[in-house]
Image (spheres, helix red, strand yellow):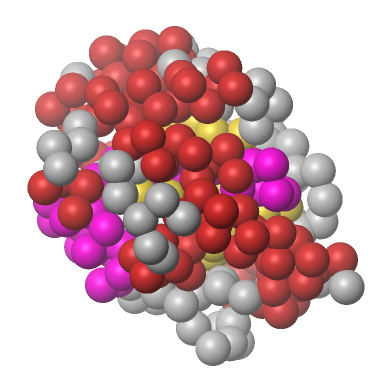
Amino acid sequence: MPIRFNKRPGLVIYLTAGDPDLATTREMALAAIDNGADVIELGVPFSDPLADGPVIQRASERAVARGTRLSDVLTICKELRAARPAAGIILFSYLNPVVRFGLPAFAKAAKEAGADGVLLTDMIVEEAGEYLQVMREHDLMPVFLAAPTSPDERLKAIAEASRGFVYAISRVGITGTQTELASDAQGLVERIKQFTTLPVALGFGVSTAAHVKAVGDFADAAVVGSAIVGLIEKTAAGEEAKAVGEFVAALRGGNAA
């Protein structure tokens, strides 16, 4: 069953859980949902986030320094599910914290917390047999990353293994805001759509209302991460939820214009 996006493009918002703190993460997620986010990606902070650019790396370091654990992220997930039953919630993590927690125990806890699915950034589809089985047993949607460099055979495997949506990476490298979308982003989405009827969400570098509008011309949803995390980093304490809500509303407003 796919994630439901209420508009085209849908809007997926990434937050590093625990930055600046857990209570604020919850309030920012609620503000994002209330201003048009279809899906919240709750990022589990990790001490060595290699795929992330400097903005998300710093957020992860701050959250780890505050002692944020996977169990805390599950608690936030549960609170969000209770407060906004219709919102999509994806747990976004590196594999290491999940392995430490225990994969079956994690899947059980994630389902009980109300998560719709899981995205493990360093879980490759070729080695995902046990993971996919556990996800199925607990009725969780596994979301995989698809890169422009992937051959069609690999994109087909990713598309077939994914549930909810497929996350298309607009360019190779680390996350971060960009001034314009990668030139091969549309081609990647079109290649993925050969192999699946699931929605395709495009991320990595999507940071403005103009980007979101452009993504809607060829993809089902836009993922905004570093731009949000960078905004949080620069916002005065206590003002973060308001700032996130206004930013998400602006992303949506740009699409509606």
Residue 34 on the magenta span:
yes
Going by the image, does 245 lie left or right of 112?
right
Q: Residue at x 69, y 73 (%)?
A: 209
Instruction: Find the magenta span and give its range.
Output: 32-61
Q: Position of residue 111 (x, y in %)?
A: 46, 15
Q: Residue at x 24, y 40 (%)?
A: 95
Q: Could you tell me which quadrant the N terminus lies in? A: top right
Q: Position of residue 139 (x, y in %)?
A: 53, 16
Q: Residue furthest right?
A: 257
Q: Position of residue 45 (x, y in %)?
A: 24, 46
Q: Residue at x 34, y 42 (%)?
A: 17
Q: Is residue 141 above or below residue 127?
A: above
- The number of callouts visible is 0
Q: Quadrant of residue 50?
A: bottom left
Q: Nearer the viewer, residue 109 or 16?
A: 16
Going by the image, does 246 lie left or right of 133?
right
Q: Residue at x 52, y 27 (%)?
A: 80
Q: Nearer the viewer, residue 52 or 72?
A: 72
Quick check: can you spot residue 249?
A: yes
Q: Nearer the viewer, residue 137 or 4?
A: 4
